[in-house]
Image (cartoon, rainbow, N blue to C red):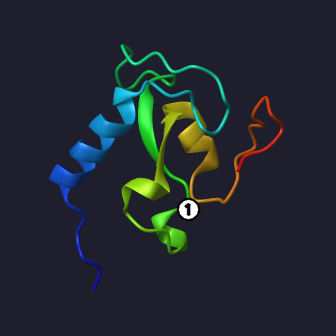
């Protein structure tokens, strides 16, 4: 049986990531942190290696992304969106 994830921990990680106002790690574009869900360009936290693929629910496996980019990436190791740098890593 899978252990549930802590919502308090999720909130702390989200706040810590948002504090530095990073760009989307998937597409490389800036994130407007004033936008709220369900706006497709709002800030969400992405698991770099999806939990479904064995990724950990730890801060070092999380990064800022747009909701739209996170949805496109889903649980894949890559997204169909290419960062300006040309790399997704």
Instruction: Count every numbered label the image shows and give the total.
Output: 1
Task: Pick whichever, 43 or 71, lies toward us.
Answer: 43
The image position of residue 51, as x and y in percent, is: 46, 66
Residue 75 sits above or below residue 30 on the image: below
From the viewer's side, name the closer residue of 1 and 63.
63
Q: Residue at x 70, y 50 (%)?
A: 89
Q: Residue furthest front?
A: 20
Residue lying at 55% horizontally and 42% vertically, measured from the top left: 71
Q: Residue furthest left?
A: 8
Q: Which residue is mark 1?
A: 49
Mark 1 residue crowding within 10 angstroms, few (<14) / some (14–19) / many (20+): some
Counting from the top left corner in percent of width and height, residue 48 is at 55, 55
Tag 1's secondary structure? loop
Q: At 25% across and 64% down in the image, what residue appears?
A: 5
Image coordinates for residue 47, horizontal then vertical, percent: 48, 54
The x, y position of residue 17, in whole percent, is 38, 37
């Amino acid at each position: 049986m899978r252990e549930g994830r802590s919502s308090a921990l999720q909130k702390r990680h989200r706040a810590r990531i948002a504090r530095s106002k990073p760009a989307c790690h998937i597409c490389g574009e800036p994130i407007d942190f004033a936008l709220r869900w369900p706006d497709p360009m709002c800030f969400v936290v992405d698991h770099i290696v999806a939990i479904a693929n064995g990724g950990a629910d730890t801060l070092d496996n999380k990064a800022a992304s747009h909701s739209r980019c996170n949805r496109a990436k889903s649980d894949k190791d890559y997204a169909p969106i290419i960062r300006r740098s040309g790399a997704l890593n």
